[in-house]
Image: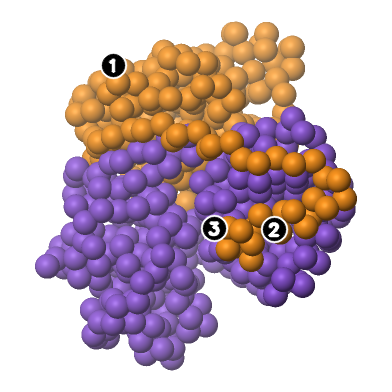
Amino acid sequence: MSEVLVYADHANGKVAKSTFELLTLARRIGTPVAVVLNAGDSASQVAAALAEYGAETVLTADDSVYSDYLVAPAAELLASLVDSRSPAAVLLSSSFEGKEIAGRLSVKTDSGVITDAVDIDSDLVATQSVFAGGYTVRGKVTQGTPILTVKPNSVAPEASAAAGAVEAVSAEISDAAKTAKVVSTEDKPQTGRPNLTEAAIVVSGGRGTGGDFGPVETLADSLGAAVGASRAAVDAGWYPHANQVGQTGKTVSPQLYVAAGISGAIQHRAGMQTSKTIVAINKDDEAPIFELVDFGVVGDLFQVLPQATEAINSHK
Amino acid sequence: MRIAVFVKYVPDAAGDRSFTDDNTVDRSVDGLLSELDEYAVEEALSIADDADDAEVIAVTVGPDDAVDAVRKALQMGADSGVHVVDDSLAASDALGTSKVLAATVRKIEEEEGPVDLVVTGMASTDGSMSVVPVQVAELLGRPAATFASEVSVDGQTVKIRRDGDTASQHIEVTLPALVSVTDQINEPRYPSFKGIMAAKKKPLEEYELADLGLSADVAGTAGATTEVLEVTARPPRSAGEIITDDGDGGTKLVEFLAGQKLV
């Protein structure tokens, strides 16, 4: 069986859930081979986690060049691996980084790229959800080595133990790839809530919060959910842009999406329309969000959310 | 300083976006400058405002109507426009489009002089792939500082801030370079009446692929590296249950969630 390269996202010795999803998809296509950059001392821990989800081989590359510069060096390493190992495909997560590596790799290998896949078949046909979730497109790469980026939370990660043999690799990184220098990095304060794009439940607030996200956050915490925000709320400065759900923010597809005080403009729908179950609370019974919901409450979110939080807490 | 800003003409997201029989995006509907490119135009203009002797060239690749995207940029204040239009460009994918855009930058350099900075949006609002900016940078062999929510140009150095989920990064590149900007970076200006009138007199160059030294199979159907096999409209969500809060809306909401085994 041919190999499928999986670009692994990891931090502090922990592998991202989205990477386990990629490995789950890769197993349908061929033999998963994970590529891990700069795991350093935690390499064996990272490799063990990757092996648990089916990585036969774990290729590790340690070089400060991968963190000192934006993705171009990582793309060069992957290009050299595509050249030497002729994989059936390269899978990456649909993050800024994943998409950028994919774009550069497609030029280097003159290959087609498909982004934001929500599913991949064994014959490399990718499914995408486009136009604000209005259409489903199935397509494939017809030239070169298929490069596919996959949206987080698209498939359920399934464990399947494999060898996870660690092999160190390296590549000659050109000077041209060392041009976008990362001068400094400031970590953002952690909220303790799940990652928005990976969360099983998302509770979002919009204009109707009037800037008070308290009830939204409290409900989210009772559900173990991530907190999202509409563009109106972010533009008003009420919530950070990193939490924006919509066309110009994150696309989420959780098991449950709760929209509180969000009218449901196309900008927002684009980011949440494919959620499995959608509920909404809005004062305006004509808000377009109600066209999408499985359950809707016409009412004041400052009454409904605290009551719901209390009911959930007593339900536990 | 010469700045090229890429602008895309896209179907209006508020309208009825769909596909044609050959599985390509239906571009016969009302279109406009991709909203995310307005931020790129604004940023290019404000960088030019702060520089001595700078010009901004708006570049689009697309069918006849696509020139509207360039016109909007000219109305906002860009100095000139370039429209690459060619029958063989229909159904171009990202890589094909990037090859044409890179060749267009080279053509501008040949005709006008060095292009110091290329500015793009973070994604288009139709394809929303976000790969064209880095593909063009890769093809031109210049650094890319991407997803910027802040850009400053000081001499030959461009600094950007990029806000990720868990951290903000400060990135530095040296000109010539490419930057892509997010919708967080600025508030795009509206064209003024004066701007709209002035735009009519601004130079607008039209190129075909041959003018750029490209063969017809670099992009379009002939140059496609991806193929769409099937397009299906998502079935509308079936109507849900909507209640009006009579003092027990929160409780009823949780009863629904419990029924769905979500709590």
Comparing B86 with A245, the one in front is A245
Q: Nearer the viewer, mark 1 or mark 3?
A: 3
Task: Give whichever of B119, A278 is nearer the camera.
Answer: A278
Q: Is residue A219 above or below residue A63?
A: above
**Position of residue A258 in the picture relative to residue A300 (left or right):** left
Q: Residue at x 37, y 30 (%)?
A: B104
Quadrant in the rendering for residue A94: bottom left
Residue B223 visible? The answer is: yes
- Chain ID for label 3? A
| Chain B on-screen colour | orange
Whole-percent x and y of residue B88? 25, 21
Which quadrant of the figure contains the N terminus of chain B? top right
Which residue is denoted by mark 1 in the rendering? B87
Q: Residue A135: horizontal and vertical position, in percent? A: 42, 35
Name the residue carrying label 2: B255
Q: Nearer the viewer, mark 1 or mark 2?
A: 2
Asked which quadrant contains residue A194, the reply is: bottom right
Mark 1 chain? B
State the residue position of label 3.
A255
Q: Colour of chain A?
A: purple
